[in-house]
Amino acid sequence: MNDDVDRLLARLTLEQKASLLSGLDSWRTTPVPDADVPSVWLSDGPHGVRREVAGRDSVPSTCFPTESALAATWDRDLLERVGAALGAEARALGVGVLLGPGVNIKRTPLCGRNFEYLSEDPVLTGELAAAYVTGVQSRGVGTSLKHFAANNQEWGRHWYSSDVDERTLREIYLAAFERVVRRARPWTVMCSYNRLNGVHASQHGWLLDDLLRGEWGYDGLVVSDWGAVHDRVAALAAGLDLEMPGCDGVTDAEVVAAVRDGRVSEEVLDRSVRRVLELVARAVPAPMTRLIRWGVDPETPGLDGRRVAGGPEGAAGAGSAVGDQPADGEPADGPGVLPEDMVAAHHALAAEAAQAAITLLRNDGVLPLTAPRRLAVVGRLAVAPRIQGAGSALVNPAQTPVSVLDALRSSFDVTYAEGCAMTAEAPDAAREAEALAAVRAADVALVLVGQVDGTESEGYDRAHLDLPAAQEKLLDAAVASGTPVVAIVNGGSAVRLGGWRDRAAAVVHCPFLGQAGGEALARVLAGDVDPSGRLAETWPGRLEDTPAFVTYPGDRGHARYGEGVFVGYRWYDELGLAVGYPFGHGLSYTRFEYRDAAAGVVDAEAGVVEVACEVVNVGERPGVEVVQVYVAPPRRRGGVPVLDGEPGEAVPVTPVRRPVRELRDFARVSLAPGGTARVVVTLEPRAFAYWDVAGGLWRRDAGTYVVELGSSSRDLRAAVEVTLPASPADRPEPTDVELHDAVVARSAVVS
Ligand code: BGC
C-alpha cells in the first residue's frame, strides 16, 4: 500500500494535495477524481451512527446507551461488542470513520457533555475506550479518539485555555488517550476546540507531534474538531492533518501559498497528505450516490457541499485505486438503510448493555419486585424517558423506545400518574394529589425523576446538580406516605439527591440507556437480571465539594486546573469528604465475599505485580460483581503527609503528593449462587508510578504499596502489601536546584 501511496503522492499537484487536507463538506473528505482518490464519510458517534442526510436529519440507526452508561458496566467485552455493532452499522451506511469515543475526563459533574464521556478515572476510561475502538475497527471502520485534549467543560470551549500542569496532564487528562493510542491504534484522533496552556489544541506542536506521534508512536491521522482550526498553516506545521468541515477552498489556498513561499516545507505537507491517503485507502468509500436515494441532492445547501468534479456519480462512488479497499466493502450505491436482522440483533445488544448499566444505589430489600404486586408508577419519565443527551451525538433510533411503563404492564398491575410537570419548580396540587393517591393505594411506588432535556448537552454546562424542585417535593411527599418508594433517577451524569434519599426504600440510577432502556429497566426491577452497574463517577454530596468548584469555569479565558491530580474520588478521599455515592458504588441483589487475597511480584525491577483473590457469591441469587483494584502509594497510610521535622528544617514527606488510592485495574465476574471465581489481574509498571516532571519520566519510589480490592472506592474488602524497589535509577532523583531549572524548561515546552 505504501507503494501506491508513494506513487499517488508523486502524481498529485500541490493544489490537489492541499485539497485533500480539508473536507468536501460537513462530513466527507475531498475526493480527487483525476487521481481516483475517493471520499470518506465521517459521522458521529459515539453511541450510534448519526449518518446525516440533510440539515440535522439522520438515517435511523441503533441508539445504544451513551458512553456514561456504557462506562457503568465496567465491561470491556461488552464495549467491544457494542463497538463491533457500531462498526457494522457504520459500514452498512457507507461511513468510513465513526467520530468517537470521547475520552475526556469528568473534571466537573457540571460539564454538559459528561454523558458522552466515560469516567472521572483515566484507567477505567482508557480500558473501556480501547475495547470500543477495537470493536469498531474490527469491522473495517475507523474511530476518532476525541477531544484531544483537556476539553473538560463546554463553557467557553472554543477559546478557553485549560491550564494544566504536566504531571496532571500525564497522569489524568492524557492517560486515557495514551492507553487507547498504544493499545487499540485508532485510525484518527480528533483535536479539541480549547486551548491547552494558551495554545489552540489544533496548533499544539508538543501535543500533536512530540507527544502523540513522537512518544506514543501514533501513526494515524489527526482531524480537527469541526471548526477548531484558527490558523491553517500553523496547524499543519503542528501536525494537524485534516481540517473539518470543508472550508470552500479558502484554507487550501493558504496552504498552497505557504508551501510556495517556503513557510511550510513540501515534506510537512506530504506527511499530512500521506496520512489522508492512508485513511482513504483503509476506509469504505463515501457513497456519493446514496444521498440521491435519500432524496437529497449533494449540492443541497444544508450539506454545504462543494461540487465534485465529475458530478455525484464521479470517482468517489467507484471504489479506490489507492491500496486495499476492504473486500466486503459495500457498493457505493447500497441500500442506505440497515438490514432488518441487523436492527433486531443490535436492539438486543443495546438491551443487554442497558441492563448492565442500571445501577442500584440503595436497597432495603424492596427490590427486586415480585409479581403480582400493585405498583404506582409516577413521573413523566416513565412514559417519555430520556434515552440520550443532546448535540452532535444525537441518534435517530432504529426502533421506537418502549417505555418502562409499558414494559412493566405485562407483569404487574400498574397505576400511572404524572405527579408534576418535568420542569416545574412548584408542585401542581391536583397532579400531586392524584399521584399520592396512587402511591398510597399501591404495594410499591416507583417514582421516576430526572433533569430536563437541554440540561445535558454539547455546547452547554449545567448550572447546578439539583433536580427540579417540584420533583424533589413530590419525592418528599411520596416517602412520607408509608408506601415503600423506589426512586429512579434518569440522567446522563451525577445529581444531588435531597433529604428523601435515605427514606426511599430503594434508589436506582437509570443513565441514558438508549432505545432499549425501558425493557431493560423493567427486567432489572423485576429481578430477571441482577443490577450490575457501578458508578464510573462520584456522586458528590454538594456542588461545593467538587474538585473544580473554585476554579470552574475559570476567568478571562483561563480554566486553571488547580486541584491537580486530585480529580473525582482522588479529591474526596484526599479531603476525607462525605459523598452522595462513591466512585465504583453499585449494589447487587446478591452478596459477595472476597477471600484469600494475595499479591506476588512478577518483576520487581520493572514493577509488575500479580494480584489474585477469590470472589464468592454467598447470596441466593445469581449476580455480577465488579472487583476494583486500587493501589495506595508508600507513606500514605496514617495521615496526610506534608512536612516532617522541626520548624525551619521541615521537609516534604514524599517527593510528590500522591492520591490516597488510585484505580489500577478491574474485573467483572458473573456468579451463580454459591459460585466462586478466582480473579487474577496483572498490575503493570504504571500502576505504581507517577510522572516526574523534572526527569521527564515515569518514576516509582521504593517502598511498600498497598493493593486494595473492593466493591467501590469506599467499600474495600481486602488489602495486600507489596514491596518494590525504586524504578531503575538511570536518572536519580534530582536536587531542588536541578528540579527548579528542569521544571521551568519543560513548562515552556508543554505550552
Ligand atoms: C463536536 C464533535 C463532533 C463534531 C462533528 C463537534 O462540534 O465537538 O464531538 O464529532 O462536532 O459533529
Image (cartoon, rainbow, N blue to C red):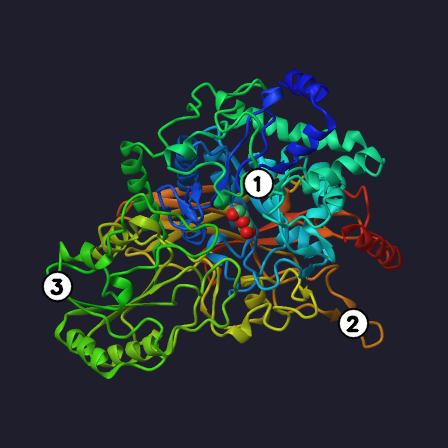
In the rendered structure, the answer to whether residue 738 lies left or right of residue 188 reads right
Tell me the residue at 15%/74% (across/down): 438
Q: Nearer the viewer, residue 482 or 245?
A: 245
Give the CA distance from mark 2 to mark 3: 66 Å
Local secondary structure at mark 2: loop
Up-down: is 587 above or below 464? above
Q: Residues within 10 Å of mark 3 (few under 14, many from 20)?
A: some
Q: Nearer the viewer, residue 527 or 309?
A: 309
Identify the amino acid type marked 1.
Answer: Val
- The answer to whether any part of residue 726 appears in the image is no
Give the CA distance from mark 2 to mark 1: 43 Å
Q: Who comes first in sequence, dot 2 or dot 3?
A: 3
Residue labelled with disc 1: 180
Identify the amino acid type marked 2.
Answer: Gly
Local secondary structure at mark 1: helix
Residue 234: horizontal and vertical position, in percent? 76, 45
In the rendered structure, the answer to whether residue 455 lies left or right of residue 229 reads left
Residue 41: horizontal and vertical position, in percent? 51, 35
Identify the amino acid type marked 3.
Answer: Arg
Residue labelled with disc 2: 645
Q: Nearer the viewer, residue 412 or 241?
A: 241
Q: Who comes first in sequence, dot 2 or dot 1?
A: 1
Give the CA distance from mark 3 to mark 1: 47 Å
Tell me the residue at 34%/34% (across/down): 337
Image quarter of residue 518: bottom left
Residue 407: horizontal and vertical position, in percent? 20, 54
Query: Disc 2 beta carbon < 8 A from ligand 1?
Result: no
Q: Which mark is residue 373?
A: 3
Query: Disc 3 beta carbon < 8 A from ligand 1?
Result: no
